[in-house]
């Protein structure tokens, strides 16, 4: 990527090909694009960054498609980042989220990008939030980030999104599932999708009962909405609930926590890179393999002061 | 990710697998997507019945290195050149465009003329396709 500044100017000026190339540069850690990060970050326009997470098959992609349709009706330009898992063995990935998002493919005001998680275990890739920031700078608002199908522990998205939507389906488990720590705990909005299935009302009621008065992170429990993403039912109310969460998410305290998480994330990635590039890397790993050295001491030698 | 893979900083090749036209099934395309995943490619799969515009849009937004078009319906002589034209028309000059499916030998020459870099018929081994993509996809510098 020869001319970074020109690429950035074109991307924020509405050139979709330029934006796509910029996103690739961010994802690949391209040095030219890396040098542009301060400008990209300074040029963000305050888009609402929304994480959409939930177990595989809950209907996240279909719900994102339906949400995009709703936001388009409201005259908003929508950015979508859909993350799918990379193979831990080959690094390859299959990203199939576009299959459910075809209706937006001809719409110039919806920009959708698929990302592989590239070895990250938190449900999103290391560069996902920088990609979202670049979409923000290019004028998309909201930016919807769909995570890989999450289990109980893929909570990274909640550390970085302003509003986290957790998508569940009816009859996802007994009441104890609802009070375990994890996914539900980080939700700012809960969608019980596939609500045309039996048990939807009851699931919502159980969730509501469990989350009411539970204290925890928020003063008030998150709204729980019934949706049928395939038919669009309940999607307008979901969009309203997401929009209504924006003010809470924008408090100085929340903004600071998010910034702190972003920096910590970059520190972790940076130290990993630094450790791996050290000449002692192979030898130290060898020593740990043979139990002549423990991993913590090895890490100290690699990145300790 | 293994330590070896983690240390390698080169980025995976991104491939769009698309099915233009009205084919009734996509078994072959899915087998190929899976095989390329196992070869370490990042594969974006768009499903059946794509128009040339949809394919060009997806290639543009996803900034892929390779577009692989699978077609069984017999409409390849109309659809494939139009897709090439649309992709090139959006300034994606360096994207490798290949095709596979049921394509008679007599059509291969004209399709290559129209900008399809290579055509893989039934029975092609996925390893050979992967090698071709690796050797011919643009390099990211």
Image (cartoon, coloured by chain):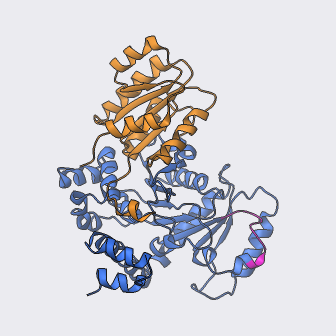
Chain colours: A blue, B orange
**Whether residue A76 is visible:** no
**Whether residue A207 is visible:** yes
Left or right, B45 with reference to A170 = left
Tell me where residue A223 appears, x and y as whole percent. Answer: 64, 73
Relative depth, front residue between A249 and A3: A3
- Taken as a whole, is the magenta stretch helix, strand or loop? loop
Does the magenta portion include A241?
no
Relative depth, front residue between A48 and B85: B85
Tell me where residue A88 appears, x and y as whole percent. Answer: 49, 59
Quarter of the view holding residue A30: bottom left
Tell me where residue A231 appears, x and y as whole percent. Answer: 68, 49
Left or right, A170 with reference to B136 = right
Vertical comparison of A244 with A65: above or below: below
Placement of the C terminus of chain A among the 4 image quadrants? bottom left
> Which region is colored magenta?
A168-176
Left or right, A233 with reference to B1 = right
Left or right, A220 with reference to A208 = left
What residue do we see at 54% from left, 73% from top? A155
Vertical comparison of B4 with A99: above or below: below
């Amino acid at each position: 990527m020869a001319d970074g500044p020109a690429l950035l100017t074109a991307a924020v000026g509405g050139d979709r090909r330029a934006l796509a190339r910029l996103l690739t540069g961010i994802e690949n850690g391209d040095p030219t694009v890396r040098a542009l990060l301060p400008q990209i970050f300074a040029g963000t326009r305050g888009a609402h960054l929304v994480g959409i997470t939930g177990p595989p098959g809950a209907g996240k992609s279909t719900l994102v498609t339906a949400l995009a349709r709703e936001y388009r009706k409201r005259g908003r330009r929508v950015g979508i980042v859909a993350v799918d898992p990379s193979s831990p063995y080959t690094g390859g990935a299959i990203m199939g989220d576009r299959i459910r998002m075809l209706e937006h493919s001809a719409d110039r005001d919806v920009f959708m990008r698929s990302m592989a998680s590239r070895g990250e275990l938190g449900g999103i890739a290391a560069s996902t939030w920088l990609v979202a920031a670049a979409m923000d700078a290019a004028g998309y608002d909201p930016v919807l980030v769909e995570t890989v199908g999450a289990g109980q522990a893929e909570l990274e998205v909640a550390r970085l999104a302003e509003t986290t939507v957790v998508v569940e389906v009816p009859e996802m488990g007994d009441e104890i599932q609802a009070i375990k720590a994890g996914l539900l705990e980080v939700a700012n909005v809960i969608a019980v999708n596939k609500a045309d299935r039996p048990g939807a009302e009851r699931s919502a009621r159980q969730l509501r009962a469990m989350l009411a008065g539970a204290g925890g992170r928020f003063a008030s429990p998150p709204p729980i909405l019934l949706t049928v993403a395939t038919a669009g039912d309940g999607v307008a109310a979901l969009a309203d609930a997401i929009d209504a969460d924006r003010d809470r998410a924008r408090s100085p305290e929340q903004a600071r926590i998010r910034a702190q998480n972003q920096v910590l994330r970059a520190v972790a990635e940076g130290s990993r890179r630094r450790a791996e590039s050290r000449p002692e890397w192979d030898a130290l790993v060898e020593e740990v393999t043979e139990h002549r050295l423990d991993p913590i001491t090895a890490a100290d030698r690699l990145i300790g002061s | 990710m293994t330590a070896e893979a983690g240390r390698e900083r080169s980025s995976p090749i991104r491939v769009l697998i698309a099915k233009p036209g009205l084919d009734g099934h996509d078994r072959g395309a899915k087998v190929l997507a899976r095989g390329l995943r196992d070869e370490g490619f990042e594969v974006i799969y768009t499903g059946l019945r794509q128009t040339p515009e949809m394919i060009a849009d997806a290639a543009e937004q996803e900034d892929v290195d390779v577009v692989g078009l699978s077609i069984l319906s017999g409409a390849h002589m109309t659809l494939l050149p139009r897709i090439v034209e649309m992709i090139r028309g959006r300034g994606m000059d360096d994207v490798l465009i290949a095709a596979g499916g049921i394509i008679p030998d007599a059509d291969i020459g004209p399709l290559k003329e129209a900008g399809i870099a290579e055509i893989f018929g039934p029975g092609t081994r996925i390893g050979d396709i992967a090698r071709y993509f690796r050797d011919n996809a643009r390099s990211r510098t």
